[in-house]
Amino acid sequence: MCIDVQSLSISIDKKTLLDAVDLTIRPNELTILIGPNGAGKSTLLKACSGDMSPTYGEILINQKPIHSFSSAKLAKTRAVMTQSYEMGFGFTVIEIVSMGCFTYEEQVSQHQKREIIRDVMNFMEIAHLSERNFMTLSGGEQQRTQLARVLAQLWLPYEQEEARYLFLDEPTSSLDVFHQYHVLSLAKELTKRNIGVLAVVHDLSLAASFADQLVLINNGEIITKGVPENVLQRSHLANVYGIKAEYFHHSVGAKPSVLMDRKQ
Ligand SMILES: Nc1ncnc2c1ncn2[C@@H]1O[C@H](COP(=O)(O)OP(=O)(O)OP(=O)(O)O)[C@@H](O)[C@H]1O
């Protein structure tokens, strides 16, 4: 069980967005995509979640081609948080979170759905915002609301033993330091429920602290992938970001970090 991306290429109007990408996204792992602006991270996330079609190559979810999934089956198999929240207009927080329950069928009672909504709102610390209009929230509050919505979609264990997946495009971009760690800790926690998580994160230290698999992308290609200490080598950081920086992990209990040289 995994998402298997094989020789994936995507081109639009003669521009190559992704070029021969191979990647495995495993349940029980947090995979983090890093890379400069315009590298192709969101495009790869959209392709893996079924929101964008390959020009070449194949994406298998749990051994089945992604294009063979009905939209209902896809919605039960994966949840997606994108960078834009076009659906927020005119809704309260609790209404938005409730939208995450659309995949649950008759066997889930209204009472159970209310419990799911309550639990995910508590989890994301937005219960006090329940009746607020989404458009009046701060950027961080909006992000936590959208996260609660996608969590609601995957909150109940799946009846079959199929792996599921969560896609998060820059889930920490508007969050303060506490909530950045909270959200990635939560993503990591979800991997223990047979869920594979793919997230785009710009902060290299944050990515290094949480990723089981780190994937460095530039110009639509995977430059390297693996454990953070191998990916975040000085030469890779220099070539891809044009920065002088070093990966540090001082002791087992401490989080790793990527430190920039004083002189660039
Ligand atoms: N629909 C599209 N049509 C044409 N070009 C596109 C389209 N979508 C994305 N691109 C281009 O493809 C490249 C990769 O975009 P993508 O959004 O995947 O980058 P990213 O790594 O997520 O960047 P960022 O960190 O800035 O969010 C960019 O140059 C972008 O302008």
Image (tube, helix red, strand yellow):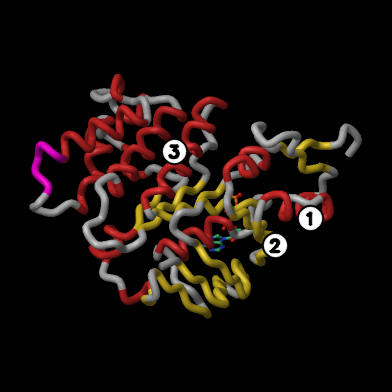
Q: Which mark is residue 186?
A: 3
Residue 26 vs 166, above or below: the answer is below
Q: Residue at x 60, y 71 (%)?
A: 21
Residue occupied by mark 1:
236
Q: Give the mark nearest the N terminus, 2 or 1.
A: 2
Q: Are marks 2 and 1 in contact (CB under 8 Å)?
A: yes
Of the two numbered discs 1 and 3 on the same chain, state the one appearing first in sequence. Answer: 3
Q: Quadrant of the N terminus?
A: bottom left
User: What's under tag 1, amino acid-wise?
Assistant: His
Q: Nearer the viewer, residue 119 or 172?
A: 119
Give the CA distance from mark 1 to mark 3: 29 Å
| C-beta proximity under 8 Å, tags 1 and 3 | no
Where residue 224 is drawn, which disc sits there? 2
Q: Nearer the viewer, mark 2 or mark 3?
A: 3
**On the rendered structure, is 170 left or right of 239?**
left
Secondary structure of the residue carrying numbered label 1: helix
The dominant secondary structure in magenta is helix
Q: What's the residue at 32%, 76% (across, down)?
A: 68
Task: Residue 96: name its quadrant.
Answer: top left
Q: Is 181 colored magenta in this rendering?
A: no
Give the residue type that dot 2 points to. Answer: Thr
Q: CA distance from mark 2 to mark 1?
A: 8 Å
